[in-house]
Amino acid sequence: MQGPRRFLPSISLLCAFEAAARTGSVTAAARELNLTQSAVSRQIKLLEEQLEVELFHREKQTISVTPGGEAYAREIRDALRKIGTASLMLRANPLGGTLTLAILPTFGTRWLAPRLPQFLSHNPGITINLVTRLSYFDFRQDPVDAAIHFGGSDWPGGEMEKIRSETVVPACSPALRDQHGFQSAADLRNASLLHLTTRPDAWERWFALHGAPAQSVRGMLFDQFATAAQAAIAGLGVALLPEFLILEELETRRLVRALDLPMVSAEAYYLVWPADRAMHPPLLAFRQWLRTQASPEGE
């Protein structure tokens, strides 16, 4: 049910208030909104009168947001961002059919992007928007329809469908492998080991699987596969990388297997979506298409 009209201020009033609260200055807000200072001041005053709440403390030529105004600004900022995103998506695809998908960077560029032309050619009315997310997020706060997630089947409040598993291999530059002459899993402890912050125990699991000491494994930290792979190519160390994501580097021998000792990851890649988007037509089409692309572990 729609609330009283006075609790639904116009967008222009909210934009003026949010800009002034964020910048702490009517002058800066006016510059950002391409308005005069008096126009911004007038809009803020109208908003305060409409809400019957003081949003700013005013002293001479300065303003400071009240505690209540600061909390209101946070809520308004999020709402304005969602409205702006919705408007942008509508402009990009006036007929609807937009799917906004959160992706993992390397999986998105190496596995998903080369396949997307096929999906789009089979579904010409759908537009896909891609945004990067490295970890869990709240679908209620982030305006995306679905996400590609690596981990367990435990996304809070989300429905999930498995895309594929993966096998990781210890990869390094040919020069580093020749320098160390690795013969066994334990030999890798003599080299620098490259770690992913999202998989902090991957090396421990790999060593334990292959019968080598797994305690006190240290080394450089990276937040993305792409940078870890580049570091390995540069000879900075050995990285545990998903084999299907580094096929090009292995084929061109920019990377080699330090040892032919793979490990199937306990986690997998999933498509995740909030329950209230389950019947969104573009998402249904994307899920159906993904099933045709999903491949067994190791590909």
Image (cartoon, rainbow, N blue to C red):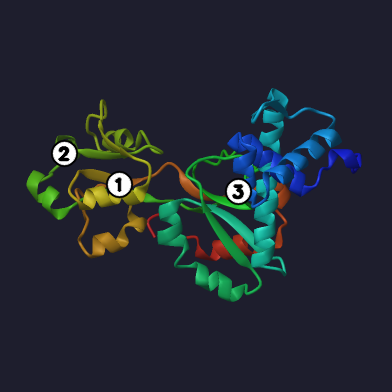
Q: Using the image as rendered, state which of residue 186 and residue 124 is in the foreground.
A: 124
Q: Are marks 3 and 2 in contact (CB under 8 Å)?
A: no
Residue 132 left/right relative to 8 = left
Secondary structure of the residue carrying numbered label 1: helix
Compared with residue 65, is residue 6 higher up or lower down, i.e. above or below? below
Question: Which residue lies at the image location 65% right of the left edge and 60% below the top edge?
Answer: 88
What is the x, y in percent for residue 38?
72, 43
Residue 276 left/right relative to 175 = right
What is the x, y in percent for residue 248?
29, 63
Question: Which residue lies at the image location 60% right of the left edge and 62% below the top edge?
Answer: 286
Res. 228 mark: 1
Q: Using the image as rendered, state which of residue 209 and residue 277 is in the foreground.
A: 277
The disc labelled 3 sits on which kind of residue?
Glu
Q: Can you identify the residue that label 2 sits on?
A: 191
Compared with residue 283, is residue 35 higher up or lower down, i.e. above or below? above
Between the C-alphas of marks 1 and 3, the distance is: 39 Å
Q: Earlier in the sequence, mark 3 or mark 2?
A: 3
Between the C-alphas of marks 3 and 2, the distance is: 53 Å
Mark 3 residue crowding within 10 angstroms, few (<14) / some (14–19) / many (20+): few
Q: Can you identify the residue that label 3 sits on?
A: 32
Regarding residue 274, the answer to whether it shows in the image is: no
Secondary structure of the residue carrying numbered label 2: loop
Question: Which residue lies at the image location 27% right of the left edge and 52% below the top edge?
Answer: 230
- Looking at the rendered image, the quarter that the C terminus falls into is bottom left
Query: Which mark lies nearer to you, 1 or 2?
Result: 1
What is the x, y in percent for residue 15?
70, 45
Secondary structure of the residue carrying numbered label 3: helix
Q: Earlier in the sequence, mark 1 or mark 2?
A: 2
Q: How many marks?
A: 3
